[in-house]
Each structure stands twice: as structure tokens, then as C-alpha cells.
Amino acid sequence: MSKKKSPQRYKMHVKKGDTIQVISGRDKGKVGEVIKTMPQTSQIVVQGVNVRTKHVKPQQEGESGQIATFEAPIHSSNVMLYSTKEQVASRISYTFTEEGKKVRMLKKTGEVID
């Protein structure tokens, strides 16, 4: 008898609204904003990255079909957080502010994200 694994929630280094740069794949070098995160699969959807086309059949009589474009998800390991001020991608570290709040910080620039 096989055991069913419950879906795990992975901690990702990116959040919705972050500016990122793609570091591998067909869209390498592109910069965009994270629209949606999927922690269960460690995937993210980025504005203007991994754009796919879908042929949509007509729904009603007399209506013509369409070609819809949409952003497909990519794996979060293929992106790095991007500093718009310094124009550079960087890894992140977790630090604490003077108030004791845990925040994300870019390693290259020292810029606090949260």
C-alpha cells in the first residue's frame, strides 16, 4: 500500500510584486515583475516572460476564433531579484531592522526590499 504525500509549501526567495531578472532559459536577461507565486510547485508567473500563445475556439455561432497570449509559469530557481536603482541582479540575505523586523536584503547592493 502506497502512502500519499501531502503537498509541501516551499519557502521561495521571491514574492508577488518583486522585480526579478531571468538568469537561465529562453528568456535569459529579461526583467519583469512577479504577478503570481505558486509555492506548492516553486513556480512563478512573471510579466512579459515565457509568453505562450493559445488558440481559442469560437464559443458562439458566427464568432471567430482567437489567438490568446499569456505568461506561463517558470521555476523560481531560474530568477534573481533585481535592483532597479543599481540595474543589477543579486542574491538575497535575511537581516533584521532596528525595530527587530526580519527583512530581505540584496547582497550586492545592500538594498532592503521589504
Image (cartoon, rainbow, N blue to C red):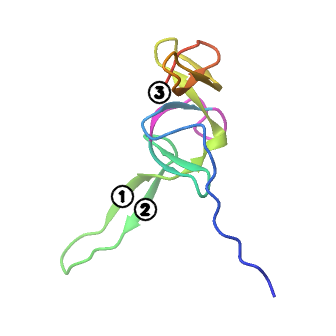
Residue behind mark 3? 114
Q: Earlier in the sequence, mark 1 or mark 2?
A: 2
Residue behind mark 2? 54
**Residue extending furthest bottom?**
1
Which label number is shown at residue 20? none
Q: Earlier in the sequence, mark 2 or mark 3?
A: 2
Determine if the magenta segment contains residue 112: no
- Residue 2 is situated, as x and y percent measured from the top left of the image, at 79, 83
Q: Nearer the viewer, residue 61 or 20?
A: 20
Label 1 packing within 10 angstroms: few (<14), some (14-19), many (20+): few
**Distance from the alpha carbon under mark 2 to that under mark 3:** 36 Å
Q: Nearer the viewer, residue 78 or 14?
A: 14
Could you tell me which secondary element the residue under label 2 belongs to?
strand
Rendered view: 25 above or below 87: below
Q: Amino acid at mark 3?
A: Asp
Rendered view: 66 above or below 79: below
Q: Residue at x 62, y 46 (%)?
A: 11
Could you tell me which secondary element the residue under label 1 belongs to?
strand
Determine if the magenta segment contains residue 24: yes
**Distance from the alpha carbon under mark 1 to that under mark 3:** 35 Å
Residue behind mark 1? 68
Q: Find out whether the residues at labels 1 and 2 contact each other: C-beta distance under 8 Å.
A: yes
Q: Magenta segment, principal secondary structure? A: loop
**Residue extending furthest left?**
62
Q: Magenta residues, as a range?
A: 23-34
Q: Amino acid at mark 1?
A: Ala
**Distance from the alpha carbon under mark 1 to that under mark 2:** 5 Å
Label 3 packing within 10 angstroms: few (<14), some (14-19), many (20+): few
